[in-house]
Amino acid sequence: MSEPAPRPYPDGWFPVASSAEMRPGRVVNRRLAGEDVVVYRTQSGRLRAVRPYCPHLGAHLGHGGRVRGENLVCPFHHFAFGPEGECVQTGYGTTPPKARLGVLECREAAGLVFVWRHARGAPASWEIEEPSADGFGPPHCTVRTLRAHPQDYMENGIDIGHFQPVHKFSVEVLDAPHFDGPRMTSTYRLRRVAGKANVLSTMAPTTRAVMQGLGILFTEADLRTIGMQLRVWFCVAPLDPGRIELRTALSVRFPRLRHRGTARILAATLPKPLVWASGKNADFPIWENKIYLEHPRLAQGDGPIMKYRRWARQFYSD
């Protein structure tokens, strides 16, 4: 079987950085859907994202560009651009030209920075929903690059058939996946089977999952036996054909712990060791060597894969 041609990039919100790394004055260059995106934070704290090239003479703002006050300054001729993208100053003190940067919509949620990407340049048609973080500690964020496609990564949460042979636990679906606009919601219970299981999976018997587009998967588990609630955001961004960047943000809280100070300390210190305890994802080497089959030969117990794929079509305008 020959390798299929690269699939198109989906539209939607995709993560490009963590909020912690975007301190005031920071400028970073990131890859998104085969193109560079420049993300920066002004000195007052405003987060901005723009297309990478200066409209003056084409310098790349992600290589040497800097923040001065509320403006992004080009490294070539020191033309300055305001938060809305307009050119406000030249490097020579002359009248600035009527030039603008290509401004991209960006948002912050769960300690991550998201940029809206649309193949035809349309504005954001939906917003990221983030539940209240009251009582939750700061999220512990991780990032890694994988050979995969965003749609395949999100499909992994629908493919309940692989959980037992790959992860050594079965899934009891409590609320079947419900598809509504750009979101999918479901609730399931994890049950350990013979063999070694992922630590987090064995601790979380009941989990609610919310998928938002093909870039965001939010999960929340109530660990009643130890009085802890666990949240994990699994977010992916397409880098180039066949490559994605996976960013996770894990946070916890202890709503039933009477001593608030102890609850805050645990919420602040536990996320990092929990990420370490979760271990390496056994899916990674499988994703990196599989292909996408347009017409898979499915069997009972696979989960609503084709229903998910029909829902996913809305995120492709190109």
Image (cartoon, grey):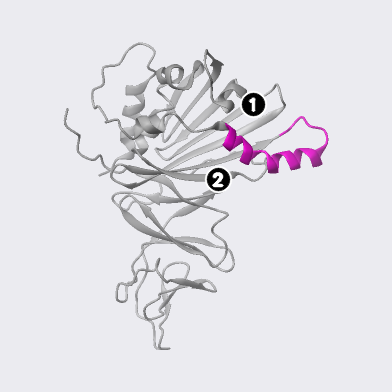
Residue highlighted by disc 1: 222
- Asked if residue 1 lies left or right of residue 149, the reply is left
Whether residues under marks 1 and 2 lie with C-beta atoms below 8 angstroms apart, the answer is no
Residue 249: x %, y % from top left: 55, 42
Depth check, front residue: 310 or 114? 114
Residue at point 35% right, 44% down?
A: 11
- Residue 223, x across and y down, in percent: 66, 25
Local SS, label 1: strand
Magenta span contains residue 162: no
Location of the N terminus (image quadrant): top left
According to the picture, the residue beneath numbered tag 2 turns out to be: 141
Marks 1 and 2: which is nearer the front? 2
Give the overall secondary structure of the magenta segment.
helix
* Res 308 quadrant in image: top left
User: How far across and how far down the image is residue 316, in percent?
Assistant: 29, 40
Q: Residue furthest top?
A: 300
Task: Answer whether residue 266 is magenta in the image.
Answer: yes
Q: Which of 82 and 225 lies nearest the eye of the viewer?
A: 225
**Residue 273 has which mark?**
none
Q: Secondary structure at mark 2?
A: strand
Residue 135 seen in render: no
State the quadrant of the C terminus.
Answer: top left
**Snapshot quadrant of residue 208:** top right
Q: Is residue 207 above or below residue 10?
A: above
How packed mark 1 is, by other alpha carbons closer than 10 Å (few <14, some 14-19, many 20 or more), is: many
Mark 1 residue type: Asp
* Range shown magenta: 254-277
- Residue located at (72% from left, 33% from top): 254
Q: In the rendered structure, which amino acid carries the disc numbered 2?
A: Cys
Marks 1 and 2 sit apart, C-alpha to C-alpha, by: 20 Å
